[in-house]
């Protein structure tokens, strides 16, 4: 890749954006800042429109988090995360060959990130993969457990106990809750929201599906290294797994 890297900064804190810009002035032969965004949605649109080589990306942002934004991209630039996660969680970034800047950003740490970047070419490990993103998302997101899901039915609000839920399935803009007795309701959650909040027996098995692990009847080998997860609901539903989520199933079965 020819330098300078066309760069977008995505962070909901203008102070953080200004600090990154100020620090990058020393590297004007390495970075060309072509855009700034204050939330994940604007960042998503800017990336798809401008196709940058590299982005500095905050994680906790309004509308779309950094992870949710990356999941929606059709064009994937090099990513350097800007994060407030603690040092223990940061190990996940290193293991996935993704660099990071810990807030508040220090010049010495940025220097190291630039040195690391300069050692890699376009096709090497700093190019974030969808699989590594999925693993990182599941590993770092905190769990805030819930015990029931409220859904609308006409003028009523129903409270569905978690033990009565077979699975959740995303379809276009909506996420549907499916009960063991074959009822279906639209929820106000995204799959990512549910991954954060549901207890550990609910397993994300693909980008669009979460199943109640206590209701898994069996696993069937499927094409391309995937599985079909067979459930105990009244329809005996079978859902195809995503390869990058197999570790979730393994951890649950141990």
Image (cartoon, grey):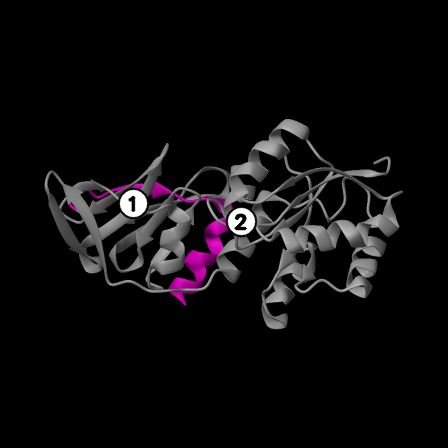
Q: Position of residue 178 (x, y in %)?
A: 22, 44
Identify the residue position indicated by label 2 in the image: 67
SS under mark 1? loop
Are there few (<14), some (14-19), or many (20+) residues within 10 Å of tag 2?
many
Q: Which mark is residue 19?
A: none
User: Which label's residue is closer to the chain start, 1 or 2?
Assistant: 2
Q: Left or right: where does residue 54 sit relative to residue 171?
A: right
Residue farthest to the left, as pictured? 155
Q: Residue at x 76, y 49 (%)?
A: 21
Tally the marks.
Answer: 2
- In this orientation, does residue 202 appear? yes
Q: Quadrant of residue 173?
A: top left
Residue shown at 68% from the left, 65% from the top: 104
Question: Which region of the structure is painted magenta?
Answer: 234-254
> Any magenta on residue 241?
yes
Residue 96: percent from left, percent from top: 65, 56
- Going by the picture, which residue comes out furthest to the top? 49
- Find residue 188 and name its label: 1
Closer to the camera, 81 or 240? 81
Q: Is residue 81 visible?
A: no
Is residue 96 positioned above or below 75 on the image?
below
Q: Is label 2 in a helix, a strand or a loop?
A: helix
User: How far apart are the alpha carbons under marks 1 and 2?
Assistant: 19 Å
Quarter occupied by the N terminus:
top right
Front-lying residue, 150 or 171: 150
Asked whether 120 or 173 is in front, the reply is 173
């Amino acid at each position: 890749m020819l330098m300078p890297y066309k760069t977008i900064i995505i962070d909901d804190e203008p102070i953080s954006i200004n600090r990154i810009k100020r620090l990058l002035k020393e590297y004007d032969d390495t970075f060309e800042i072509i855009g700034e965004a204050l939330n994940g949605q604007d960042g998503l649109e800017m990336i798809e429109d401008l196709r940058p080589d590299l982005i500095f990306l905050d994680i906790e942002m309004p509308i779309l988090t950094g992870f949710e934004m990356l999941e929606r991209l059709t064009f994937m630039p090099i990513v350097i995360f800007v994060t407030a996660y603690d040092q223990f969680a940061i190990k996940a970034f290193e293991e996935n060959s993704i660099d990071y800047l810990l807030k508040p950003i220090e010049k010495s740490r940025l220097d190291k990130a630039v040195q690391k970047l300069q050692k890699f070419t376009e096709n090497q490990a700093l190019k974030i993969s969808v699989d590594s993103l999925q693993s990182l998302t599941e590993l770092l997101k905190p769990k805030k457990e819930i015990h029931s899901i409220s859904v609308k039915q006409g003028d009523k609000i129903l409270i569905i106990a978690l033990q009565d839920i077979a699975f959740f399935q995303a379809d276009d803009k909506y996420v549907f809750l499916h009960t063991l007795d074959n009822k279906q309701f639209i929820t106000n959650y995204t799959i990512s929201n549910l991954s954060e909040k549901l207890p550990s027996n609910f397993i994300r098995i693909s980008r669009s599906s979460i199943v109640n692990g206590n209701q898994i009847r069996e696993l069937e080998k499927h094409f391309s290294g995937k599985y079909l997860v067979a459930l105990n609901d009244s329809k005996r539903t079978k859902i195809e797994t995503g390869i990058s989520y197999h570790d979730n199933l393994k951890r649950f079965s141990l």
